[in-house]
Image (tube, rainbow, N blue to C red):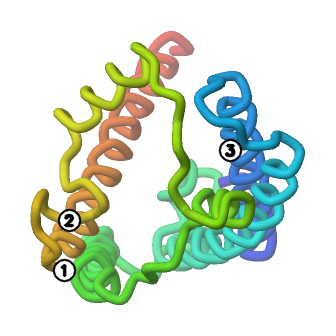
Amino acid sequence: MKKGMSKKKIAFASILGCILTLQLGAFSVTIETLLSGVTELPFVTFLTLMQPIHLAIGLIEGLITAAVLCFIYEARPEMLQNSKLEEKTARLSYKKVLVIFTCLFVIIGVGVSLFASSNPDGLEWSIERITGDTEIEASENEVYETSSEIQEATSILPDYTFEGSESKIGTSVSGILGAFITVGVLVVIGYIVKIERKKELKEVE
């Protein structure tokens, strides 16, 4: 962690990063929809609806990200960067931090996810404002049909539930599974980065 880093800077970077990525993602979806030619959604109208709703979503996600990173900054600052560059001392052990995050995964994945809103998400909200429905009719072609078949064959927990069931247990399973898959991917990336850093240090020596 570079000298001079603070919780204010972490919060600002988190919020800005989330807003920018959500804005770019929303813009990309409108471009992909236009280029795909499978729907007749008016590009300009679709774009002007997608951007503001995802601005709000990005702000909320940024605040959540900031809260998590600020907690890590206080608990184990070296987890954000090389501890040798940071004079700030850790307040919690790695084990305690791991236990806290694991408990949060379980609480949010199993409990909070059951109260997730059934209202349309940003994309569905934008489509509904144009067509009056969250679903749109797509002009089918060979590529579209093949993609749909692949999605149906490989989809795990479609619509966050078990196939053919409306049980809320599927929502909890989806939350837990999604959390641990995300953590697993981050661990693998972190491991790869660690190996690369060791290689760089050996080359310098």
Q: Quadrant of the N terminus?
A: bottom right
Label annotation for residue 51? none
- Estimate how packed mark 1 is, as few (under 14), some (14 to 19) or many (20 or more) residues with alpha carbons within 10 Å: some
Q: CA distance from mark 3 to mark 2?
A: 25 Å
Q: How many marks?
A: 3
Task: Check disc 1 and report its element: helix, strand or loop.
Answer: loop
Where does the image place residue 44, in percent across and percent down from the top left?
89, 44
Q: Between tags 3 and 2, which lies in front?
A: 2
Tell me the element at label 3: helix
**As drawn, 157 above or below 42:** below
Label 1–label 2 contact, CB within 8 A: yes
Residue positioned 78% across, 64% down in the render: 55
**Label 2 environment density (alpha carbons within 10 Å; few <14, some 14–19, many ≥20):** some
- Identity, as a three-letter code, of the amino acid under mark 1: Lys
The disc placed on residue 25 is 3
Would residue 88 be seen by someone viewing this image from the given angle? no
Q: Residue at x 76, y 59 (%)?
A: 19
**Residue 192's image quarter?**
top left
Q: Amino acid at mark 3?
A: Gly
What's the distance in space between the residues labelled 3 and 1, CA to CA? 29 Å
Image position of 141 with respect to 183: above or below: above
Query: Most extreme residue toward the top, as rendered?
Result: 203
At horizontal 45% and vertical 83% (from top left) the residue drawn is 117
